[in-house]
Amino acid sequence: MNFAKLLTPQAVKVLSSTTSKKRLLTELGELAAATYGLNAQTVVEALLAREALGPTGVGHGVALPHARLSGIDEVTGLFVLLEKPVDFGSVDRQPVDIAFALFAPENAGVEHLKALALVSRTLRDCGVCAKLRANPKPDTLYTILTEAEVIKAA
């Protein structure tokens, strides 16, 4: 499992006008529709259902919203950097400015967990997050994410 398999350059976006958690999840649904041809409303409903179980804000300004969806064949992801952090109900009560959403097939087993572990491990690295926050251009963000795992593997 690697970022290049999870994420396309088109799945990386900088959001400037997001003002709430619900709006962020809506933006993720719209990006999933534009990037992967998924139904935006279905994506938003799945993310909201997952959030109802407990917030996916993992701390230090990072959220990892995720959901299982019917109609997809492999685990895919979206990365967004928010210009203005939003309250996400995170464990440390800090607002979120980095979100990596993961979508897995309904019957995905270990692949979903491997993807979640990869993203979580990478975004726990303060150095990677600092680089992401300092480079608000989608193509640069994509490069940072895909290179971060190569550096960690070395």
Image (cartoon, rainbow, N blue to C red):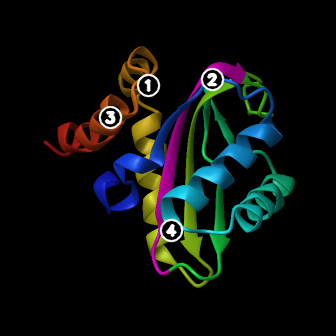
Q: Quadrant of the C terminus?
A: top left
Label 2 secondary element = loop
What amino acid is found at the position of numbered circle 4 in the picture?
A: His
Neighbourhood count class around disc 4 (C-alpha, 10 Å): few under 14, some 14–19, many 20 upward: many
Label 1 secondary element = helix
Residue segment shown in magenta = 73-85
Does 135 sit above or below residue 13? above
Instruction: Give the prevailing secondary structure in the magenta stretch.
Output: strand
* Front-lying residue, 78 or 94: 78
The residue indicated by pointer 2 is 16
| Residue 65 visible at all | no
Instruction: Residue 97: give x, y in percent of width and height.
Output: 61, 26
- Give the CA separation, mark 1 to mark 3: 16 Å
Point 37% across, 27% down: residue: 128
Instruction: Residue 102: give x, y in percent of width and height.
Output: 55, 57
Q: Which mark is residue 139?
A: 3
